[in-house]
Amino acid sequence: MKSLKKVLLISVLIIVGTIDILIYWNSHIYYKAKGIEDNEKKIEILDKAVRYYPVNDNVFYEIGKAYFALGIENLDDKDKNVDYFRKSIESFKHSIRINPASQFCHFNLAQSLIYLNTLSPSLYLGPYEEYKKAVFLVGENSQIFFEAGIIFLSRWDELSEGDRNFAKGVLRKIMEGKDKKRQQTIMQIWEMNVKDYSIMEEILPEDSRIYRMYAKFLGEKSLLLEERQKYLAEAELIEFERAKSEYLSGENELFYFEMEEAVKHFNLCLNILKRIKFYQNLSSEGNLIDLSEFNDLKRSTLLKMVECRLEEGASLKDVESYLHEYLDMQEKVAEVREFESFLLDRGFISKKLGDSFDDLELLSLQLFMSFKQNRYRDIMRIGRLFQQSFVVVPEGKKADYVRILQIVGDAYQKIDDVYEAGEYYQKALEIKPDNLVTLLKMRNNYERLNDNRKIKEIGGRIDKVLSPQKIDIKNYPIKKGKKFYGTLILDGQKIILDITFDDEWKMADPLVTVFFNGRVVWEGYLKEKTISIPVETKVGKNSLEIAAVNRGVGVRMIGWRVTNRQ
């Protein structure tokens, strides 16, 4: 009995040892074959590995790859390539029977099936199930996941409804990722093989970055303009919601006196609002962003920025740009009064208006806040004090002095004392003869006095300050994806903006976008040499941007003409 056990043990050891040797030689030959570039030689060697140990899935996988490569190398010989692809399929299937969880094998089997189906359509073997199995076995960021999505999209017409739904899920996952190159590739494959806008609508995530990327792609490819504008409008809506979220985060930080963090959120909110060009005005989507809500948010954020910065220790000079923009937008007396109290409580301004004429910039600010609160009598008192005092105005403070004189003149106009108002405007013009704001106020004063001679005279002075009504920019080239930037000095009237392009547009069908004062006012494919756009201007500098979306253009002339005096 002991002898029998001993024999059995030795037999088991011999069998195990033999299997280990066979596995070793199988693996040895497998790794040796992987380095061989000649696919026929590689198959010959791997066949030996199979004879040693026929259950190594990696060996059959490598045989399948070698046969697949031979099929690709012999695409011009149908008899050979069909045979090679058949053998690659058999090898991949054998590997999968051993290891069903091999995503690479499922994917390569699907690739072989695709080629065999193309070469012999009557043999249709259904590759898409294998692609699905590969996708199920890999992560969303893998190359196989991405390549499977591309293959589904590139062969969209032959997919069943079920396969299309599966593909949409894969494609959406890719578009939700952060790989910009993959997302752009998906768009390119869609454009070449599908071009169904409803499909893109289903696979695009609600992400402003992706919406903008898609809109840019549509523009560069000269595709449906309405679709481009719709996604730009929706991207801006998403960004507006994000701006509101940043504002609320800033308020929360402010509640806990975390001023530095609050400023970051408020600053980010303002930057987001600045990027919104109101494409909804061009889109059929309607008013996605309520303009009054937009202005309220911007106004509130500007105020919070000023308050936070001042609480941090900044001076009024440090927040000057935010401060004046806020006051220009604010029309509610109670809100201005509350802000004035904030400045008073913290010692930034004096309680008595005009307590000192040493700081003209500060006095200008106080007068402006008083004007916003309808305290015209107080402002007129300051004007009289100025007349009675000897005030030396240095060169660097003349702009502030002119602003003070303008506000005093405005106060007199509000109580219908146009003669006194005119005197202050005239004093302002003596200091800055070409100040457009003062010239316009003076013209308005003469109109109220019905002094036609003076109206004509001041109108001539205004015309000299304004930008020429025709500006020859000598065929300025704008490259694809770039912009022309210009500034027009205007008087706040409604105008027609005329932009003339060079003659090459007839051959190119360029897509052009025009922005005026940060808002989109026109976008389209050029059909005429000159486009005419009605716009509302502001007094002083007005920004103009002309963007070439899909190909370069040359701008020859920019002109403007009045439509209706305001």
Image (cartoon, grey):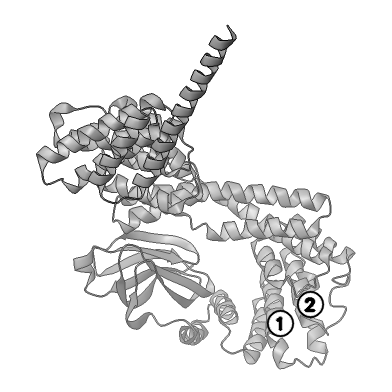
Residue topped by disc 2: 363
**Position of residue 397 measured from the top left corner of the image (x, y, whole percent):** 72, 87
Discs 1, 2 touching: Cβ within 8 Å: yes
Q: Nearer the viewer, residue 312 or 493?
A: 312
- In the picture provided, is 327 more to the left or to the right than 114? right
Q: Determine if residue 130 is in view.
A: no
Give me the C-alpha separation between circle 1 and circle 2.
Answer: 8 Å
Q: Nearer the viewer, residue 152 or 82?
A: 82
The amino acid at mark 2 is Leu
The amino acid at mark 1 is Asp
**Position of residue 182 measured from the top left corner of the image (x, y, whole percent):** 41, 49
Where on the picture, by quarter, is residue 26? top left
- In the picture provided, is 415 more to the left or to the right than 171? right
* Secondary element at tag 2: helix
Sequence-first disc among 1 and 2: 2
Residue topped by disc 1: 400
* Disc marking residue 412: none
